[in-house]
Image (cartoon, helix red, strand yellow):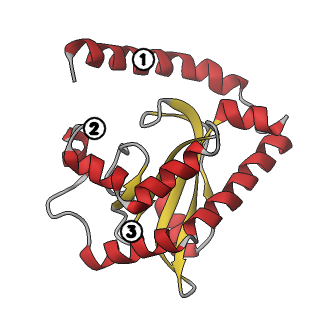
Amino acid sequence: MSAFRRSLTILSIATALIAWPAYAAKFEMTPAIQGALDKQKAEATAWAADPLIVKAVTDQNTRGPIAGMDNPTWKSVRRTDPLIGAFQNNDAGKLLKAKADATHGLVSEAFLSAAAGEKVAFVEKTSSYIHKGAPKFDVPFSSGTTWQGNAEFDESSQTYAIQVSVPVNADGTAIGVLVVGVNLSEVAKAAK
């Protein structure tokens, strides 16, 4: 990444962090917005049931996490690294991208995790490689129920979003988790 692009990225993150308290103060979870989020949870559940997604998670569960890869190491991997491209360009990554693109901006990110919380596929590089220990992974994986986060600025997608996550099941048991970021600007439009 060039110094200029890095400076722009830092500036955009700083601007977002400064603007976030004002945006969050104005954000109101209305019944219509919750209804739109519930609709997206149902969509995510359908995505997670796709045989290609289930197979990708099943296959990853036989391999396990990348040896030596932890969250601090992951943060140092550049978005242009072939490793990142492998997560985006595998069949599950391509499917998530197509499904996210079909929402016309409603879904700002999507990523798939296997049983140890490690990544299987994603649309854009995630902030963490392993999400085990975070509610977005632990709740759907351990309880088999959906999870919904709070409104926040998402660094990966550079949007204000609410993440929702659902289990990926095989034979009635959670084997992984699909997390979808729902763009707050777009969900507010969809709720009108």
- SS at circle 1: helix
What residue do we see at 27% from left, 19% from top? 6
| Residue lying at the far left of the rendered structure | 68
Residue indicated by mark 2? 79
| Label 3: few (<14), some (14–19) or many (≥20) C-alpha neighbours in 10 Å | many
What residue do we see at 34% from left, 18% from top? 10
Label 2 near label 3: C-beta < 8 Å?
no
**Quadrant where the image shows the C terminus:** top right
Q: Is residue 176 left or right of residue 48?
A: left
In terms of sequence position, does the residue under pointer 3 or pointer 1 come before the other?
A: 1
Of the residues shown, which amino acid type is indicated by label 3?
A: Ala
Residue indicated by mark 1? 12
Q: Is residue 1 left or right of residue 155?
A: left
What residue do we see at 57% from left, 85% from top? 172
- Which x, y percent locates residue 122? 41, 52
Q: Report how far apart the C-alphas of labels 3 and 2 lie in the structure.
A: 21 Å
Of the residues shown, which amino acid type is indicated by label 2?
A: Arg
Residue 56: which numbered mark, if any? none
Residue indicated by mark 3? 114
In terms of sequence position, does the residue under pointer 1 or pointer 2 come before the other?
A: 1
- Which x, y percent locates residue 21? 58, 22
Of the residues shown, which amino acid type is indicated by label 1?
A: Ser
Q: Is residue 8 above or below residue 39?
A: above
Label 1 near label 3: C-beta < 8 Å?
no
Q: Report how far apart the C-alphas of labels 3 and 1 lie in the structure.
A: 31 Å
